[in-house]
Image (cartoon, grey):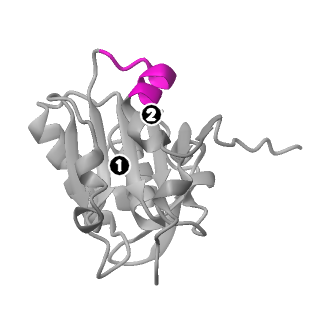
Amino acid sequence: MNKIIKIVPKIVFGEKKFDSLNEIAEEIFKIREGYIVYLIDSVHHKTGLKNRLNARSQDLVIDVDVSLYEPKTEQVDKIRDEILNKKNIQMPALIIGIGGGSVMDVAKAVSVILTNKGSCADYQGWDLPKEKAIFKMAVPTISGTGSEATRTAVLTSSTKKQGINSDQSIFDAVLMDPELIKTVTL
């Protein structure tokens, strides 16, 4: 039996492409009527990248702080609840994860848990989500994690550190702008 592996179907690459993020998202996902949830690494308050987002009035911008710990299932559940509470249970058209691997993992997990009932911890394992996830897009701001290209969203729960490993957790598109990583320092 052959295993067919799903990969990211759309990759946009180029300098200054971040400044066209909304137009690119619209072209790929046709989201005129829906809203976008931007999950952005909280470090981008300091870098100024958050100020470059061109979010529309109906969109949500949520800071994701992963500076002190790896992403947790409880954090994903809280973000899901925040989205649903602010938007009266209306589902977003698109989730965009902006940051390093941890933020991209959170974005993958949020897109899955919005359409699959229960806690995020219920889906740590292999091919557990049954419902199609919300469309999701990655914007890496650091290189080397590979999160934008894998089907794994690594999360820590109260009992384990394990990934949501599913075709539902692979990004539908990736925007790679080399300008975003050229000033990264350790």
Residue corresponding to mark 2: 135
Q: Secondary structure at mark 2?
A: loop
Q: Secondary structure at mark 1?
A: helix
Instruction: Assess whether mark 2 and mark 1 are in contact (beta carbons under 8 angstroms).
Output: no
Q: Is residue 29 magenta?
A: yes
**Label 1, label 2: how far apart the Cα atoms are:** 10 Å
Q: Which residue is painted at 55% across and 37% down in the image?
A: 172
Q: Which residue is painted at 37% across and 31% down in the image?
A: 22
Task: Name the foreground residue: 17 vs 112.
Answer: 17
Sequence-first disc among 1 and 2? 1
Residue 81 image offset from top left, x and y in percent? 18, 48
Q: What residue range appears in magenta?
A: 23-32
Q: How many marks?
A: 2
Q: Is residue 63 magenta?
A: no
Q: Is residue 122 visible?
A: no
Residue corresponding to mark 1: 110
Task: Name the foreground residue: 128 vs 168.
Answer: 168
Can you say whether 104 is above or below 36 in the image? below
Q: Label 1 is placed on what type of residue? A: Val
Q: Label 2 is placed on what type of residue? A: Phe
Task: Name the foreground residue: 122 vs 6.
Answer: 6
> For residue 31, which quarter of the picture?
top left
